[in-house]
Amino acid sequence: MKIGWQLAAVTFAATSVIVGLIWDISWHMTIGRDTFWTPAHLAIYTGGAVAGLASGYEVLRRSFFAKNEPNDGVTIWRIFRGPLGGWFAIWGAVAMLTSAPFDDWWHSAYGLDVQIISPPHAILALGFIAILSGAVILATSAQAKETAETSTRLAPWLVAYTSGLVLAMVGIFTTEYHDRDMMHSGIFYLVSALAFPFALLAAARSVRLKYPATATAAVYTLVMAVQAWVLPLFAATPKLGPIRQVVTHMVPMDFPLLIIVPAFFMDLVLQRTEGKNLWLRAAALGVTFVAAFVLVQWPFANFLMSDASRNAFFRTDNFAYMIPMDFDLVRGVFSTESVADTVRGIAAAVGIAVLSSRLGLARGNWLRSVRR
């Protein structure tokens, strides 16, 4: 089957939102917020506008100009009808546009953000989630409508791609707990266990590929690796104080976490536990995620904190201009924590990962059932 224009538009919008979000964070780490009309903000709001306009047009077309077509969408107020993913995109666009003047006022009143999730950013994040969810639902619906005769095998890859963008967004919004100096602490693994199994398994149950979680994690890995390689190619200097680091080029976000390794083993567990009780599957998947992630990320963290990783590939010299020289991250040392606290944190992460896995399985089963 051909991929519909609305799916193409919303997928482009989701991509533009993620690119703009990463670019915006890099802009804040490198330059500081000098104006609302930064290129990064334009990329974000272009994504919102494209998603909203494309989906809004499709709702109006189906509601008033295509009444004789089969109603394979969702009807609201008995008048407006359109695909479920399109409604998500519309709601996301409205949330994003609502957050724009609020965010501009917030910065005028309080200055530079001290954390990613400020009140206007929380509204903006809801818009991101809705638009990316809309893209995933539209892709999943297209995948469900494919038959042996019409299949182009493109739809499953679009589901994996859009799910990978969701995984990237999850990683971005939890990045404050994923700094390199925290990678030997319990909170790092606890937050990872809360966020990633849900997103990976929602994709794994909805993507019709042999290794769906791995494919989804590969998209996340590629997105985060490319930004780490490309952004530092552009010259830039800070425009706000205090300036504590020498910055001459765009500062990227961190090199991707090695989520692709536990994702691969989770795919294997899914294949071997097909038809089993969902809670037993969730338990096996949660333990698998934490065990595999600790085994690969812990030693990788040692490398990332060494001088050997401060190069053009791993980009671990990516210090935001306002970070003091005595921070653990800059000094290349891990945050101090007792062994007992770390063990307790990882043990708690196992329990959290099981619950996150169970919710991810449920979410994926629901996505798999979407037909409109």
Image (tube, helix red, strand yellow):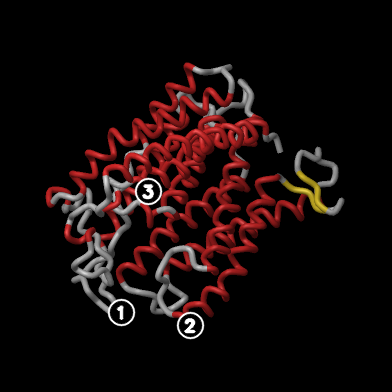
As helix, strand or loop, the secondary structure at mark 1 comes to: loop
User: Residue 11: x percent and y percent?
Assistant: 54, 48
Residue type at mark 2: give it: Ser
Q: Disc 2 designates what residue?
A: 108
As helix, strand or loop, the secondary structure at mark 3 comes to: helix
As helix, strand or loop, the secondary structure at mark 2 comes to: helix
User: Residue 359: x percent and y percent?
Assistant: 57, 37
Give me the residue at 29% from left, 80% from top: 241
Q: Give the spatial CA distance, label 3 vs label 1.
A: 33 Å
In this rendering, the answer to whether 20 lies above or below 360 is below
Q: Which mark is residue 118?
A: none
Q: Describe residue 3's horizontal placement relative to residue 175 as left or right.
A: right
Q: Mark 1 against mark 2, which lies toward the viewer?
A: 2
Dot 1 alpha-carbon crowd within 10 angstroms: few under 14, some 14 to 19, many 20 or more: some
Q: Mark 3 against mark 1, which lies toward the viewer?
A: 3
Q: Disc 1 designates what residue?
A: 239
Q: Nearer the viewer, residue 23 or 154?
A: 23
